[in-house]
């Protein structure tokens, strides 16, 4: 008998801290028949994250974590992820660094999107640093998370030309559009091969 598409989508959790534009794209894509993932939990370290409105609107359960005591926060989080049988984690503008213990428990199952052509400009303010160094190109990278910041195996990169009048803000907005388009596609393809 032919296997029904959509019956065995991988249970996914998306971690956010801010506006959630990538979360919105991931949610939209997850509802398509061809998607291989289903978002069943949104996690944020910021109770004021605008992205939480997408979780509410789409009736996706969400968790707001106080990261002041990291060990305690991650213990609670790991318990919940296990309860919900989460198979893959997507970091989408999550501004906290996960502990190596946490990463070990989801080895090869945590993806992150970073707004530079890694290994260049790891960490914060990547757009501004790219502009300051008068780079000709920028873009974004989707990579696996390991215990070193923005250093995991690269799964996908998109390269974009930087124009003379670009500011960090203009560059960020232009790159974000491509992030929103590609993140769901890359995730779906990656998950299909797990």
Image (cartoon, grey):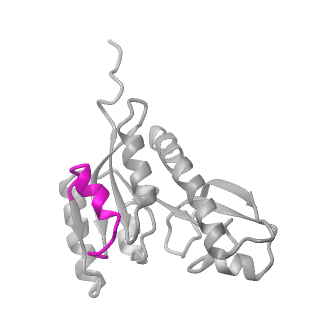
Any part of residue 107 in sight: no
The spot of residue 135 in percent (x, y) is: 79, 73
Left or right, residue 132 beside residue 52: right
30 part of magenta stretch: no
Name which residue lies at 60% across and 53% down: 178
Residue at the image position 34 percent from the left and 20 percent from the top? 3
* Image quarter of residue 20: bottom left
Residue at the spot x=45%, y=57% of the render? 22
Q: Residue at x 22, y 81 (%)?
A: 72
Q: Which residues are magenta?
A: 46-61
Marks counted in the figure total 0
183 is higher (above) or lower (below) than 2: below
Q: Position of residue 59 (x, y in %)?
A: 21, 50
Choose top left, top right, bottom left or bottom right for residue 79.
bottom left
**In the current view of this chain or complex, which residue is farthest to the top?**
1
Within the image, what quadrant is residue 101 found in? Answer: bottom left
């Amino acid at each position: 008998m032919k296997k029904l598409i959509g019956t065995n989508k991988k249970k996914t959790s998306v971690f956010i801290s801010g506006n959630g534009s990538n979360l919105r794209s991931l949610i939209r894509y997850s509802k398509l028949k061809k998607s291989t993932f289903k978002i069943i939990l949104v996690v944020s370290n910021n109770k004021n994250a605008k992205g939480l409105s997408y979780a509410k609107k789409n009736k996706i359960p969400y968790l707001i974590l106080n990261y002041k005591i990291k060990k305690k926060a991650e213990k609670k989080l790991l318990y919940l992820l296990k309860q919900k049988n989460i198979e893959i984690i997507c970091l989408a503008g999550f501004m906290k660094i996960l502990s190596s213990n946490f990463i070990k428990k989801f080895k090869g199952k945590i993806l992150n999107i970073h707004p530079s052509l890694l290994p260049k400009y790891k960490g914060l303010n990547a757009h501004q640093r790219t502009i300051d160094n008068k780079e000709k190109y920028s873009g974004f990278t989707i990579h696996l998370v390991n215990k070193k910041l923005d250093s995991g195996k690269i799964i996908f990169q998109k390269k974009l030309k930087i124009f003379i009048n670009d500011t960090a803000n203009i560059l960020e907005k232009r790159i974000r559009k491509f992030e929103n388009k590609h993140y769901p596609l890359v995730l779906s393809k990656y998950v299909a091969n797990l």
